[in-house]
Amino acid sequence: MKKILAYVTPEKHASLFDVIVAYDSGADVVVPYTEITTEDMRDIILSGVFTRHSDDLKNTAIFIGGHDVDMGEELLNSILKTFNELPDSLRVSVAIDPDGAYTTSSACLVKIKSSLKELSGLNSTILAGTGPVGQMISVLLAMEGSNVTLTSRRIERAENVCEMIKRRYNVEIKPFEAKNDETTEKAVSDSDIVITTGPEGVRILPRRIWSRFPIKVLADLSAVSPCGIEGIDANDDCREIERGKIGIGALAIGKLKMRCHHEVVKRLFEEKGIILDLERVYEIARGFDPT
C-alpha cells in the first residue's frame, strides 16, 4: 500500500523543499493542497480517513507547511477538532513545520545544549527574531527556562509576536527594539546566548559588539555570506571563535535539522494518529547525537 502524504499550506505554492524531503523520507505520493484555510481542513480530513480500512490509515498522513506559524497552528487545531468528531480508530498522523521553523529551532536548541547543557536561568537574545524560526527558538528557549528577549527593528512588530507566543504557547518573551549598533549592543550586553535569525546575507551582529561581552554561545541561522554574526562561518560546529565563546553556524544546524525533518516524515507512517507538534519535534531532535 502506498504511503500518501497530503501537504497542506495556506500559501499559493507548495514548498519544493518540503516536497523533496517528503519523497526522500519515504513518502510514495505527495499531494499538495495550496491556499488552504481552516474551513477547508474538515473535508480534507474526512476524505483521508474514509478511503482506507482503519488498520491501513498509518499509510496516510498530513504535513502542514507554509510560512506562517500562527496560521499553521490554526490549521492543526482544525484537524484536531475534526478528529474529535470521529471514532478513535479513524485517525491519520499529522506533522507541522511551517517554514521549517519547528525542525530548525529544535536542531538549534540541541546544538546549543550540547555546549551549555543547562539553559535554565540563562539570558538569551534572538536578534531579528520575529520570523518563524526566531519565534520557535524563542519558545523552546523559554520552555527550557531561559530568560528570552526577542528583537525587531520595530518594537510594534516584536510586541505583536511576543503577544502571539504568549497566547499560543503560554511563555513570556520580552520584546525589544534593535535597529542600530547602540540598541543592538544594549540587547546583547547581558546575554549568555545570542542567536540571529534575520534575512540571508545581512550582517546583524558585528564582532566589535559581541566581543566586548561575556556571551557564551553565538548561533547564526544564515548560510549566505555575509553571515548574520561576524566571525562565524556557516560550517562552524560548536567552535570556539574567541576565548570562552562558542560559535554555531547555519550549516551545522542545518545538518541536524535535515536529520530531524527526515525522521519526522518517517514517523508519520509508523503509526496512525500521532501529532508531531513543536514539543514532539523537539523530542525527536533531542534523540540525535548533536555532533
Image (cartoon, rainbow, N blue to C red):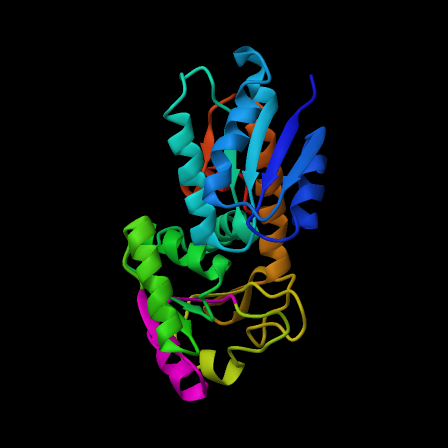
x and y percent of residue 105 in the render? 49, 53
Q: Is residue 222 above or below residue 112?
A: below
- Which one is in front, 60 or 274? 60
Residue 172: percent from the left, percent from the top?
A: 27, 59
How far across and down, in percent of the image, does residue 262 sit? 62, 38
Residue 91, how many percent across, how many down?
47, 22
Q: Out of 259 and 162, give the one closest to the viewer.
A: 162
Q: Which residues are magenta?
A: 174-197
Judged left or right of residue 167, residue 14 is: right
Q: Is residue 139 magenta?
A: no
**x 52%, y 81%: residue:** 207
Q: Can see residue 109?
A: no
Q: Quadrant of the N terminus?
A: top right
| Front in this rendered view, residue 6 or 208 | 6
Q: Residue at x 49, y 72 (%)?
A: 243
For the point 54% across and 55% down, which residue is it?
67
When the figure is inspected, residue 114 is found, relative to residue 44, above or below; the finding is: below
